[in-house]
Image (cartoon, rainbow, N blue to C red):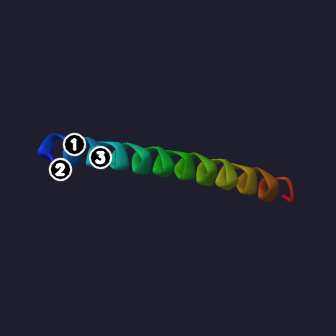
Amino acid sequence: MSIGKVKRQIDGFLDNLYKIIVQTNNATERAYGFTKAASSDHY
């Protein structure tokens, strides 16, 4: 197991983790915006 191979695996893992975080943030913002829009309709 070479250092380069381990580094690539870690880089790939972090890259996937970052993509998941970005997708979660986008979904959270959309849900928040939708909730805000829905609640403002009532007033």
Foreground mark, 1 or 2? 2
Disc 1 from disc 2: Cα separation: 7 Å
Amino acid, disc 1:
Lys
Quarter of the image that includes the C terminus:
bottom right
| CB atoms of marks 2 and 3 within 8 Å | no
Looking at the picture, tell me which residue is in the foreground, 27 or 6. Answer: 6
How many numbered marks have been drawn onto this rendered protein structure?
3
Q: Secondary structure at mark 2?
A: loop
Amino acid, disc 3:
Gln
Number of residues whose C-alpha sits closer than 10 Å to that of mark 2, classed few (under 14), some (14–19) or many (20 or more) = few
Disc marking residue 32: none
- The residue tagged 2 is 1
Q: Secondary structure at mark 1?
A: helix
Specify which label sits upstream in the sequence, 2 or 3: 2
Q: Is residue 36 left or right of residue 17?
A: right
- Considering every residue shown, the one lying at the far left of the view is 3
Number of residues whose C-alpha sits closer than 10 Å to that of mark 1, classed few (under 14), some (14–19) or many (20 or more) = few
- The residue tagged 3 is 9
Disc 2 from disc 3: Cα separation: 11 Å
Foreground mark, 2 or 3? 2
- The residue tagged 1 is 5
- Considering every residue shown, the one lying at the far front of the view is 1
| CB atoms of marks 1 and 3 within 8 Å | yes
Q: Secondary structure at mark 3?
A: helix
Q: Is residue 19 left or right of residue 3?
A: right
Amino acid, disc 2:
Met
| CB atoms of marks 1 and 2 within 8 Å | yes
- Considering every residue shown, the one lying at the far right of the view is 42
Q: Residue at x 81, y 55 (%)?
A: 38
